[in-house]
Image (cartoon, rainbow, N blue to C red):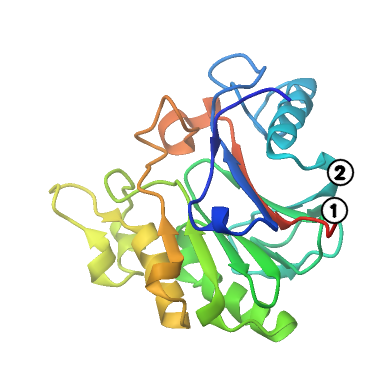
Amino acid sequence: MQQIPLIRSTLFGKFPELSFAMSTRNGGVSPEPLGMNLSFNVGDEQENVRRNRSIFFGAVGIGPERVVYSGQIHSDIVQEAEGPGKLESCDALTTNRRDLYLAISVADCIPIFLYDPVAKCVAAVHSGWRGTEQAIVAKAIREMSARYGTNARDLVALIGPGASVCCYEVGEDVAKRFPPEIVDRSNGTQPRLDLKRRNGDLLIDMGVKASNIETSADCTIVGKDRYHSFRRDGNMSGRMLGVIGLKSLP
């Protein structure tokens, strides 16, 4: 197994039945600046992407054939994953099936991962400003409750690396859609959104314990040496993946 940098979770690491990791921009075979690019949709050679995915999933210890992806259309749609492949018209996935791994593509939008250690189910949520405005993470929790009997107080959550308030500038038309406490106007130019804080607030509003929420401080826009960022690099940006799932029973 090739050793590559992986982003892990302190909270998720307490659960041996759970597989979780996120890739970085480092360790792949694609020419720079793509590096460890895991998307087929950014102009990279398909063979490079296949090799990168093989390296990444091998490092995580799961089979690529056991992964399910969401189409990530900047919606608030949550779908249940029942098998590997791709569910095109959604931005969040849930499952209680073992040996099925939910993947989110990342290059600035906020990735959120949920695990219910009581009901034994997981979710992976892609939440850009549109998804955050529509409270997609709250909808994912409601779906987990309806489908698997999840109590939000049992959930463990990770808000992963993404565009942070230091750098995520938006226009006034977007800023006015959000509560003023997550809009930073201190730089005197364009307003900046704190999408991580907003998603954390939504988790707490749904009943998730603050002690069960882990939030990455890393900004993908700033972290040029570690992260892909579409905001920073435009069409030269690759994509990372975050993946979560329950291991097979012995």
Q: Is residue 163 left or right of residue 169?
A: right
Q: Is residue 203 above or below residue 37?
A: below
Residue at image coords 50%, 72%: 134
Residue 203: % across, % down: 45, 73
Residue 70 seen in the figure: no
Q: Is residue 28 left or right of residue 137?
A: right
Q: Is residue 74 above or below residue 211?
A: above
Residue 221: % across, % down: 38, 37
Residue placed under numbered mark 2 in the picture: 65
Q: Secondary structure at mark 1?
A: loop
Mark linked to residue 250: none
Residue 119: % across, % down: 69, 77
* Amino acid marked by disc 1: Pro
The quarter of the rendered structure image containing the C terminus is: bottom right
Camera-side residue of 44 and 26 = 26
Determine the image quadrant of residue 52. Answer: top right
Q: Is residue 62 above or below residue 140?
A: above
User: Circles 1 and 2: CB distance less than 8 Å?
Assistant: yes
Count of numbered circles on the image: 2
Measured Cα–Cα span from mark 1 to mark 2: 7 Å
Q: Residues within 10 Å of mark 1 (few under 14, many from 20)?
A: some
Q: Secondary structure at mark 2?
A: helix
Residue placed under numbered mark 1 in the picture: 84
Residue 203 seen in the figure: yes
The quarter of the rendered structure image containing the N terminus is: top right
* Amino acid marked by disc 2: Glu
Determine the image quadrant of residue 195. Answer: bottom left
Residue 80: % across, % down: 76, 69
Q: Residues within 10 Å of mark 2 (few under 14, many from 20)?
A: few
